[in-house]
Image (spheres, rainbow, N blue to C red):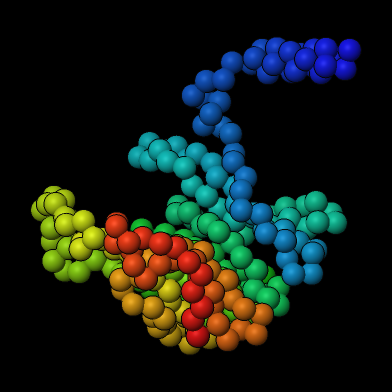
Amino acid sequence: MKALATASILVALFVSASAQTWDPDMQMKVKAVGSPRVSPDGSRLVYTVNEAVTTPDKSEFVTQIWMANVATKQSAQLTFGEKSSTNPKWSPDGKWIAFTSNRKDNKNNLYRLSLDGGEAEPLTDLKSNVQNFAWSPDGRYIAYTMADPKTEEEEKKEKDKDDAKVVDKDDKHARLWIVDVASGETRALTKPNWNLDELAWLPAGDRVVVKGTDHPESDEYTERILPFR
């Protein structure tokens, strides 16, 4: 009887949902919520909202960052503009939000936003795209992965629509970088021929642990955990 009752509920839900036709217009009106992050003190939550933007000269999906108060359940939008802001992460002291945005030259760079108010500050100005990133435990640095930017020769080939490349020679791999939040100085911690993905700081803040490989060649690729100072 329990199985029959469950089946009846599922059928009822299906009939109710199908009563309203799902069409392209409805799809464009749906807002997708993602990337939830709870503040260090547990009082607030940041998340992203992805929605369609349609104007006479534009039709695309744009993501912006919102913040909610856990106790009151009130939400407020933190980022605005025509470009997306994604992947928000709290600073260890809960005073800042770091995030990535392609608001300049369509390149995904790091920004930070003070929760006391004001505009977002750029932390990097790169010609490539920041991928994953993480705050150091003391909040002084942010480690991130990024592939090296294209060379002048590579940009020329792309402009000429020459997409021929040699496997394992012309590939761009993500390596580990670090930025000093106060000064904006950046430096690479790994060589160009590494390929890295996930990363995390050790509690002492003196090393970054990453998942990746120092042999990204197709016939040698083996991922492992690698620590760096």
Q: Where on the picture, by quarter, is residue 167?
A: bottom left
Pinpoint residue 101: horizontal percent, then vertical percent.
46, 61
Pinpoint residue 119: horizontal percent, then vertical percent.
55, 70
Note whether 9 is above or below 207 in the view shown: above
- Residue 174 in sight from this viewpoint: no
Note whether 145 is above or below 46 in the view shown: below
Q: Where on the picture, by quarter, is residue 213?
A: bottom left
Number of marks present in the image shown: 0
Note whether 186 is above or below 150 in the view shown: below
Question: Which of 43/83 is in front?
Answer: 43
Left or right of 155, for residue 108: right
- Residue 167 in sight from this viewpoint: yes
Q: Where on the picture, by quarter, is residue 90?
A: bottom right
Q: Given the current orientation, which residue lies at the most extreme right position?
A: 1
Q: Residue at x 51, y 31 (%)?
A: 28
Pinpoint residue 69: horizontal percent, then vertical percent.
78, 58
Left or right of 157, for residue 206: right
Q: Residue at x 16, y 57 (%)?
A: 166
Q: Quadrant of the N terminus?
A: top right
Pinpoint residue 208: horizontal percent, then vertical percent.
54, 78
Note whether 26 is above or below 134 in the view shown: above
Question: Which of 96/202 is in front?
Answer: 202
Q: Residue at x 61, y 48 (%)?
A: 34
Question: Which of 78/147 is in front?
Answer: 147
Q: Residue at x 49, y 24 (%)?
A: 24
